[in-house]
Image (tube, coloured by chain):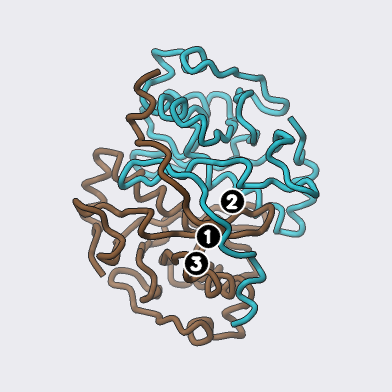
Chain colours: A cyan, B brown
Amino acid sequence: MQKVCNRRLVQKLCKSEIGLKAVQIVCKLFRHFWPADSPPTPHRRHTHGNILARKAFTISIPSEENVRQVDYFGLVSGRTVDKFAATKLTPVRSDHVDAPYVKEFSLIVECKLAHVIELGLHTQFVGEVMDVKAEDSVMAKGGLLEIAKIKPLVFAPDTQAYYGIGHFVGQAFSVGKGI
Amino acid sequence: MQKVCNRRLVQKLCKSEIGLKAVQIVCKLFRHFWPADSPPTPHRRHTHGNILARKAFTISIPSEENVRQVDYFGLVSGRTVDKFAATKLTPVRSDHVDAPYVKEFSLIVECKLAHVIELGLHTQFVGEVMDVKAEDSVMAKGGLLEIAKIKPLVFAPDTQAYYGIGHFVGQAFSVGKGI
């Protein structure tokens, strides 16, 4: 597990804005796929109470091969089932916050709870990123995270289906220059 | 353009929680790909002032074939360039809020500004979904949105690249039942 950036680095990146945005987007794209620690969360969920009590959560990004484990996490409640034991996944104590992450997953984001926004039946939790860690196997040259190697799941809510990441379409801040 | 759900329907869906979550996830997955009206937004952006002034924004979801236009929107500022004219896209007056949507894009979400959260250099805007509209061409049987037909872009922030949606991996709330 390689340290991608710690809080200090995140703060430094924030000054250029691009770094913060990158981290934020990673969180947004993926935070639905590890229900144990991901916002937004219905009030009735066990997770909801955990985040408020610990004032922290982690985002552990699974890959396509974890799809059965990910789905299982959405099917049962942590109140009645030890999800880690049932899925043969390993909880690891975080370095910076009071919430576990998943050892077997390739990309980890540790967050301190920063804002709590009530949205009716759901609560939106906004976290301050304290640390980002990634396996060497999902890094591209130059220490960048390579989404094609992470192979995250995309959830299609209407048809309730999981999809993979597809083909490269274009380079950002570049492909539009011809207009 | 077919009406997927109006505010009343969204509220009804909220009672089952699943509906609200579906709409929320759609917003989260895609709101980065139409910078003109999408949160979170750096303070310096023209968009930032527009959202605060109108207390509204829309999320217009482009497809892979719009990648050059989408990228162009991130390269220039609405302060100095008429982005709609340059990209040959058509602004349409929304039915429920004071913000335009993009006629050529297949999925439209109209939002009333509900919460404004300051996150340092960025502001997080949370909207109440007032209306969702979709082209017939992106609907599956039963009036469901079909992500494989929408063909949204996935942005990989670290490598600054756009990807498509890949293959079907599994059925949610089902594939994990065997564990």
Q: Residue at (77%, 57%) from the top-left corner?
A: A15
CA neighbours of label 3 inside 10 A, class few (<14), some (14 to 19), many (20+):
many
Q: Quadrant of the C terminus of chain B?
A: top left
Q: In this view, does A175 lie to the left or right of B110?
A: right
Which residue type does callout 1 highlight? Answer: His
Which residue type does callout 3 highlight? Answer: Trp
Q: Which of the pair B151/A91 is nearer the observer?
A: B151
Please state the chain letter of the residue tagged with numbered disc 2 in the rendered image.
A
A88 in relation to B84, above or below: above
Q: Are marks 2 and 3 in contact (CB under 8 Å)?
A: no
Q: Do the residues labelled 2 and 1 touch (CB within 8 Å)?
A: yes
Q: Return the x and y of residue A50 as percentages of the image width and height.
A: 51, 24
Q: Name the residue under label 2.
A: A25
Dots 2 and 1 on the same chain: no
**Disc 2/disc 3 C-alpha distance (Å):** 14 Å
The quadrant in which residue B130 appears is bottom left
Q: Can residue A1 be seen in this view?
A: yes
Q: Name the residue under label 1.
A: B32
CA neighbours of label 2 inside 10 A, class few (<14), some (14 to 19), many (20+):
many
A1 in relation to A21, above or below: above
Q: Return the x and y of residue A48 as percentages of the image width and height.
A: 45, 29
- Name the secondary structure under disc 3: loop
Please state the chain letter of the residue tagged with numbered disc 1 in the rendered image.
B
Q: Name the residue under label 3.
A: B34
